[in-house]
Image (cartoon, rainbow, N blue to C red):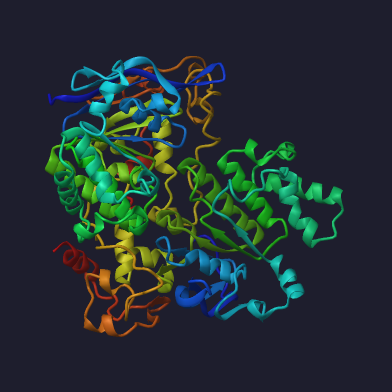
Amino acid sequence: MARKILEVNQMTAGFLVNTDIVKATDRISFDLEKGQTLCIVGESGSGKSVTSLAVMRLIDYAGGMILEGDIKFNGEVLSTKSQEEMRKIRGNRIAMIFQDPMSSLNPVFMVGEQIAESLRLHQNKSDKEAMKAAVDLLRQVGIPSPEVRARQYPHELSGGMCQRVVIAIALACQPELLIADEPTTALDVTVQAQILDLLQQLKKNNDMSIIMITHDMGVAAEMADRIVVMYAGGIMEEGSVHEIFAKPSHPYTVGLLKSIPGFEDSHGEELYTIKGNIPRINELPTGCRFHPRCTHAMDICRKQEPGFFQLGQDHKAACWLYEEHGGDSIVSPAGAAIAHGEVRV
Amino acid sequence: MSRQLSNETLIEVKNIKKYFPIKKGLLSRVVGQVKAVDDISLAIKKGETFGLVGESGCGKSTLGRVILRLQSASDGEVIYAGKNIHTLGSSELRGLRQDLQIIFQDPFGSLNPRFLISDIIGEPLKVHTNMKPREIEARVVELMELVGLDANRRNRYPHEFSGGQRQRIGIARAIALNPKFIVADEAVSALDVSVQSQVLNLLARLQRELGLTFLFIAHGLNVVRHISDRVGVMYLGKMAEVGPTEEVYNKPLHPYTAALLSSIPRPNPALKRGRIILKGDVPSPANPPSGCRFHPRCPMAKDRCKAEEPLIREVLPGRQVACHFPLVEEGAFEKMAAMSMG
């Protein structure tokens, strides 16, 4: 068994809104092994970004808090550390990339300076050494003529280049864990392909583990070793990437996969839809949070929240369907076809 | 394909150009031009969905707006119902506006937050028709039901609706006057997958029921594949390739189309197949490369591509491409993929 770099255990994170506590994630648990990539997939409001903020303990600054459960990084409990202690870990041993590269860079500093900052802070490098290392990092992330680019400001770079700079900042201290929150969502597909490729390479070369947050099942399929599917603050299904795509089992996962347009045979046909809308986090239904939109909903789904049912060695789903099925999957024909490569996407 | 397409052309775009001047200095001297749309011609048939794809900054939205004369063209013609939209007087244009509508990308920014839903959907009726308030209200109810909204909620404000519902409001407003032609500019890009599929189905149903023609602009390549009958691929203000959707997606002829399509992440972990990863970024449209605009990033570029600009021409029936060396032969795509790897 490989070493676990991150363990999230029954973690509930939330925000205080007026006098109510709104839970953005509800008792979620997952592990990440060293050297692996875990993708957290879900639609807006599923709690995937809050999860990453909680791991970084940045949620404290966003007006939220960890209400329950714990987060362990290399066996160290992060959820009770002081912000001062966290500051030594953040940007050093755990780094983060955000969605919008333009707004995560400071417009009034040169990009080289912004990379050098974390090197000076965490590794006590001199200005000169740090700047030299920054240029090396820019070269590593594939920016042409890095000496020139290091002295430019963010507005002088394209979106793809800015994202490379952000990645260089994240990599500066050779973190053990990289959290990437929708790192390619703001980019065009050809640039997205470049960035995903770069992340894969860097992961291999630097022996990093990655948590990647995405709403795009395609990106998850390419990047992930493991997948966690979240919906409205809860984990619906978890498993290895092959299990999830070969045997999508939670009705939400199946629906998500089937609603993706663009299959060869989908043209001119009605697309599969999940009826209704994503519920607001403070208006969650009783029982299973997905039941009002679920085509398989049963009585018990309305009353009681399902726990996880094990579906395979490395695959589990939170759905009552599997209580009696004893682990049989309700794999949809479309889901299976996607998985077996019969449908080209 | 389920629908029969007519051969009648609804809208014809002839050599349309849109240049934006770059001004500098105290006297705002014009020092250059951004050629956002540079000499594009296309004909959209009645009842079809024409998909327009390309990366940000390629000019696809500008083209959509120029076709509707929401922006003036620098040169060229847009022929609708036998008339050039760009030379019409304002009263004639106003008449035509009923036929030509647009759905915007941002379901938050495109609805006035201070208007009730009934006012938003009813406004085009107020402007363009002599309907009485009661008739307008009845039509608003009808429209809301048509797009799948609860008509009892018509006296609410936009912020009380979710993103998908707001997009339905925008659609109801666009179809209020029974238009013939709708430009859908990134109409589903801001929506989550499960909601996006609902709106795509709605657009397809409205097209069948109301006989609409769509220009569907999107950067989401999967979405365009699903909804379009024909597709046009733009790069830096030029049309790179035009053809029937399935043919283009199965056998792209332009190297740019090939690269673009190969970079779509596929929801299938078993299919980690070779992507064509383009080098560098899209150049600035203010200073496009000589010859073929794609040549600096093209793995297949030869000397001729640097010197001579390829004109768009029909190389296979119904398939137009602007490339000196289109990927016509069997195995040309694989060869290109291999070249970009090495």
Q: Point out residue A131 in the picture as x, y percentages from the top left corner.
A: 18, 48
In screen coordinates, is A50 left or right of A140?
right
Above-or-below relation of A278 to B80:
above
Which of the 4 quarters of the picture holds residue A335? top left
Percent from the top left, x then y, of residue B125? Answer: 77, 56
Q: How many marks?
A: 0
Q: Quadrant of the N terminus of chain A?
A: top left
Q: Residue at 27%, 24% (x, y): give it.
A: A86
- Residue sitting at x 80%, y 56%: B126
Q: Quadrant of residue A325?
A: top left
What residue is rendered at 21% in x and 60% in y? Answer: A144
Residue B159 place in picture, x, y as percent:
63, 38
Tell me residue A49's x, y (percent).
Answer: 39, 33
Q: Residue A341: tell me if it is visible.
A: no
| Residue that appears at 44% across and 31% down | A46
Is residue A15 at all visible to an observer of this figure?
Answer: yes
